[in-house]
Image: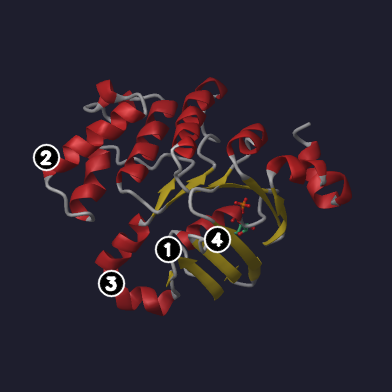
Amino acid sequence: MNPPLLTIRDLRKSFGKTEVLKSVDLDVGRGEVVAVIGPSGSGKTTLLRCINFLEAYDGGSIRIDDSEVGYNDARKRRGERALARMRAETGMVFQSFNLFPHLTAAGNIMLGLTKVRRKSRSEARDIAKVWLERVGLGHKADALPSELSGGQQQRVGIARAVAMEPKILLLDEITSALDPELVGEVLEVVRGLAAEGMTMLMVTHEIAFARDASSRLVFMADGAVAAEGPPADLIASAEANPRLNSFLARFR
Ligand code: ADP
């Protein structure tokens, strides 16, 4: 079997005296879609932020394609440009969209392509157009974020991340800030990417979606992976796992 794309071992991270990640072990294989579920405060977002270099970790290791993401010192040594390039390997989509408000939909996608990937503006514009079409927003290339619905903004966020051709896409509660009627269009885009073999690690409260779209569910509790497995197996095994059972009970 191929080695995993993402390998996390004994990952530890504290904020002051609060141990948020106690010892996380997790592998994600190429083309795998892994959904992370778990109670609020269990460390899910912090885990994604460590993988995307937004947060330095205190111990353990995160390897992407056998290259160590690195601690604080390594990050400083690398410099900002190298960091931006490394970060582009792990495209991240945020709960709150995080689009640049003064840039159009196309402009948001072009920024990383020109600055980090060193594409020409015309090449970047072409790539942006392709991805906007892919998420159903070909006609909104020149719209500002304020002129788009939440669901449309989030689709631009996804297009911006995948346009950089990341090795893995990290999705952090990407539907949580949306009105319920806008959730479907965003999940549809994620489903399409999954079908095309995009490797994804997503944190989600959409249990039904996690079950349907992921090949593996990871249940985090108290800063560690408490259970994992194929969605149907994990859900079926919940009775034997009190923490998982009480978490899932909320969605029944
Ligand atoms: P989850 O995504 O599972 O809800 P988080 O990773 O967001 O969990 O947070 C885990 C814990 O870490 C929480 O107790 C939260 O308050 C704490 N935490 C997260 N970020 C910070 C930070 N920058 N400074 C201090 N504490 C933080």
Q: Is mark 3 on a helix, strand or loop?
A: helix
What residue is shown with label 3? 79
Vertical placement of 56 versus 148: above or below? below
Mark toward the viewer: 2 or 1: 2
Please tell me in which quadrant of the rendered image residue 87 appears.
bottom left
Point out the tag, 4 or 3, that comes first from the N-terminus: 4
Q: Is mark 2 on a helix, strand or loop?
A: helix
Q: What element carries label 4?
A: loop
Q: Where is residue 59 in the image (x, y as percent from the top left)?
A: 56, 76
Q: Residue furthest front?
A: 1
Residue 117 appears left or right of 159: left
What residue is shown with label 2? 122
Point out the tag, 2 or 1, that comes first from the N-terminus: 1
How packed mark 3 is, by other alpha carbons closer than 10 Å (few <14, some 14-19, many 20 or more), is few
Can residue 20 be seen by looking at this rendering? no
What type is the residue that disc 2 sits on? Answer: Ser
Quarter holding the C terminus is top right
Point out the tag, 4 or 2, that comes first from the N-terminus: 4
What residue is shown with label 1? 53
Disc 4/disc 3 C-alpha distance (Å): 35 Å
Q: In which quarter of the image is ligand 1?
A: bottom right
Q: Residue at x 41, y 39 (%)?
A: 97
Instruction: Determine which of the numbered discs, if any, sits on residue 1 in the image.
Output: 4
Point out the tag, 1 or 3, that comes first from the N-terminus: 1
Vertical placement of 158 versus 137: above or below? below
Q: Which residue is drawn at 44% across and 59% down?
A: 52
| Contact (Cβ within 8 Å) of mark 2 with mark 3 | no
Mark toward the viewer: 4 or 2: 4
What type is the residue that disc 1 sits on? Answer: Phe
Distance from mark 3 CB to nearest ligand 1 atom below 8 Å? no
Disc 4/disc 2 C-alpha distance (Å): 40 Å
Distance from mark 2 CB to nearest ligand 1 atom below 8 Å? no
